[in-house]
Amino acid sequence: MLLLINALYLNSAYHAEGIYLPATLLLAFLAASYHPVWLIQTGFKIFCAVIALIAVWALVQWLTGRGFLEEKSVRALALFATPNTLATALNLGLIPVLGFYLLGRGGRCVYGLALLLFAALLATQSRGGYLGLLSGILFFVTFVGQASVAAEWRRYRRVAVGFLAVLAFFKFYAWLGLASWSMDPVFATLSHGDSSYRWEIYQLTWRGLAEHLWLGIGYFNFGYYFEVHKVPPLLDGRTFFVHNDYLQFALETGLLGLSLFLLLIITVYGQLFKFRQQAMSERRLPLILSAAAITSMLAHALVDYPFYIPVLLAVFGAYLGIINQGFVDMGARYLQLPKIPVRQFLGLNSGFIGNVLVIGLALWFGLPAFASASADFGLYRLLHGDAQNGLYWHGVARLLQPSEAGYYWREGVILRDLGVTQSRPELVEKSNVVFSQGLEVNPFEVNNLLEKTALHRQYRTMLKQPASHRDIMSWIDYVKSRQPHSDPAQMEYVRCLDFVGEHGKAIEQAKILKDRRPQSKPVQKLLESVSHE
């Protein structure tokens, strides 16, 4: 709820993800809380079938070296954006399946599924995935206790032998030169620390905490913060994630957001160990296995960003709902909402009113998707030479999502290009207005201001009131302050310097840019143009 409030009211920049992500977590939690039996008996079987297919896909990717709908990579990623995200998803299936087997349930099929998921996890070569697996197993063993481990020691031994066999196969397959796989990155991290520049990201994030202590910089705003504050060797990189969800929550939602998140975790584990003896005596497997699963994700969140991935949030929320219902069934105190009696309201049945509210909420949540589809269809019409309908559908997208700065930028670029090619000053004037509106709805997204600056510099004769040299330089200075290491911003800065008559400084900045990008043809042409050679 805090994330929703932050996204809707506290954040000065709009992100559709800021609504979708917390809503996904909340809805999955509520669905699991109200329908735990179906989720346990049927939903988990469906999830296991899906995650098994994903595991097979990942293994085939690693064994063959082919991407299969994705780019080739030495690390398997299946249909996910990164191998680390795949590793988190695999652990959310592997840990419960493994725990189910180690509690004396299931036979060869469950054992084989556990080995399949473990093999797919190795194919990701994700250090965070290994951390999540280890954390989930340690929690499980601690929770079930020594007596349970001793009673099922044969199954533990069978799992250990199976895992070692899978590891041996991976090592042998890599030794044959048929694929790339190694544990060296893990040992290197343990002995020398991380080598993927995450420590640098953590440091710049930590410095920002003191400046935005209580409410943070806004949910999902780390990408903007990173653009301003990034340091070598990350100057050419771009990321929206800290790769530590706890740090990112602290920066984006302040101490208030981090405290509530940690309070949620403490409450869950406090209740788990409070009811530990009862859960074990009553063999509450869904609760135990769900707790082990979320432990793996919480551990992985120390070095990655699983709480910013919708499908992972949905699974986490479902597990949390199962745990919640397990506590209720064991007699835990909980807040019970008063029952609303069925009665007529304005002559309408309460069931009808409920359906209308659900449909209205679904349509509201669907607005970002509808807007994206409209913009994509508009682009499709533009590519087929239908400029009028292309522009119309981009306008629809902007109407559906008036706080999304990207749609203003796209519509403004189309209006500008049409106005210039058709010699229609009114379209150029309209593009200027649209760019200005885009900057107003999101001052952090400076692409609108960058295009507006270039518009007043290049096509000022088509504008009724072209900006002064002073205004142009103030605009480009603001763009640079938000994106100090962006090549487009730096190149426009050089052009603006040349435009206002500061030719010497323009040449100097162009040479600096050329030293940074010696192979870049656009930069070479820029240097030639401002040098007037």
Image: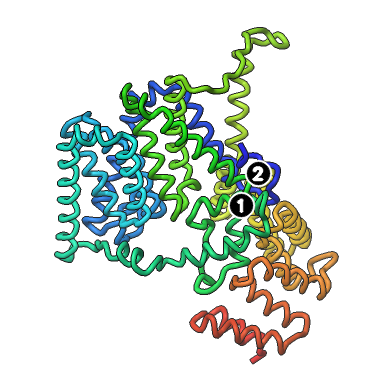
Q: Is residue 147 left or right of residue 517?
A: left
Q: Quadrant of the rendered structure where residue 22 is?
A: top right
Quarter of the figure with the C terminus: bottom right
Q: Is residue 427 visible?
A: no
User: What's the residue at 67%, 56% (across, down)?
Assistant: 212
Q: Position of residue 195 (x, y in %)?
A: 40, 68
Q: Position of residue 59 (x, y in %)?
A: 25, 50
Residue bearing the label numbered 1: 252
Q: Position of residue 46 (x, y in %)?
A: 33, 31
User: In the image shown, does 514 or 468 lie closer to the viewer?
Assistant: 514
Q: Is residue 369 left or right of residue 6?
A: left
User: What's the residue at 52%, 22% (across, down)?
Assistant: 333
Q: Amino acid at mark 1?
A: Glu
Q: CA distance from mark 2 to mark 1?
A: 9 Å
Look at the numbered disc 1 and give the secondary structure of its residue: helix
Look at the numbered disc 2 and give the secondary structure of its residue: helix
Q: Are marks 2 and 1 in contact (CB under 8 Å)?
A: yes
Mark 2 or mark 1: name the one nearer the start of the chain.
Answer: 2
Residue bearing the label numbered 2: 6
